[in-house]
Amino acid sequence: MKRIGIFCLLLSLMLYANTGNAQSSLSIEASQLYSTFSFTDSQGTSLNSDYSGIFVGSYGLAYRYNLNNGITLRTGIGMRKAGATMVYDNMNYSWDLQYAEVKLGGGYILKNERISPYITFSGYYAYMLRGYQTINNEDINLMDAGTINETDFGITITPGFQFTFSDKISSFLEFNYRMGLQNLEKDEGQESKNTAYGLTLGLTISFRK
C-alpha cells in the first residue's frame, strides 16, 4: 500500500511539473467501423467465422490534454452502432445495435510542427439505446425480449496522426481496434462480444496552451 501511495505521488508530481506547456483541446469526430461479433458456444468452440461484419458509423465529442513530455490524456462521449450478419440453416440473421458511450484513456504523442504520430489506449463503457435482431423478415426487439445485456464495456487501441494547421486548429486521422469484454448473451453458457475495426476523422480546436 505504501509503494502504491509513493507511485501515485510521483505520478502526480510528474504531471504537475509538465503542465506549464500543456495543451487542452476539444474535438468532434466521426468514424466508419467494421463491426462483428466474437462468439463462443457452450462447448467452448469459437464460431467467429460464422459471422459476417457490417459497416456502421459512430460520432462523438472528445476532450484532449497533451503534456509537454508527450503524454496525452483523452476522454469523450459519443454514439455508435454495432452488429453483424449470419446465415444458418438457410435462415438469414442480422443484428442492429445502437449505444451511447463514454471513453477514458491515455497514450503518447510524438509532437512535431505539422504531423504528430500518436497511440492511445482507452477503456469504454456503453449503454444500449436500441437493439434488434432480424430473422429473415421478422424483427425482434432484443431489449423488450430481455435476451441481451444492455451494457457493454471494453478497450480500444488507437494509433493515429495529428495534422496541425495553426496554434488553434488541427485535425486527426485514427485507426481503431475495439475489443468488447462484456458478454452480450444473458445465457451464461455461451459468449458473444462486440468487435470492431475502423477509421476516425476529427477536427480539434485548442482553447488553452
Image: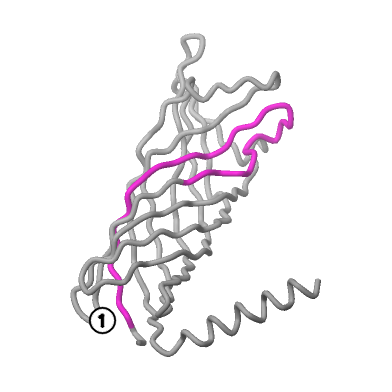
- The residue that disc 1 covers is 168
Tell me if 8 is positioned left or right of 51 in this view.
right
Residue at the (40%, 62%) spot, across then down: 60
What colour scheme governs how the chains and residues are painted in the rendered image of this protein?
A: one colour
Q: Residue furthest bottom?
A: 20
Indicate the quadrant containing the C terminus: top left, top right, bottom left or bottom right: bottom left
Q: Residue furthest right?
A: 1
Q: Mark 1: give few (<14), some (14-19) or many (20+) Cα within 10 Å.
A: few
Question: Which stretch appears magenta?
Answer: 178-206
- For residue 2, which quarter of the picture? bottom right
- For residue 117, which quarter of the picture? bottom left
Question: Does 129 appear in magenta?
Answer: no
Predominant SS of the magenta segment: strand
Q: Residue furthest top?
A: 89
Residue 127 at x, y percent in the picture: 58, 53
Pick the front one: 91 or 141: 91
Residue 145 at x, y percent in the picture: 65, 35
Helix, strand, or loop for circle 1? loop
Q: Amino acid at mark 1?
A: Lys
Residue at the (50%, 14%) spot, across then down: 88
Pick the front one: 116 or 46: 116
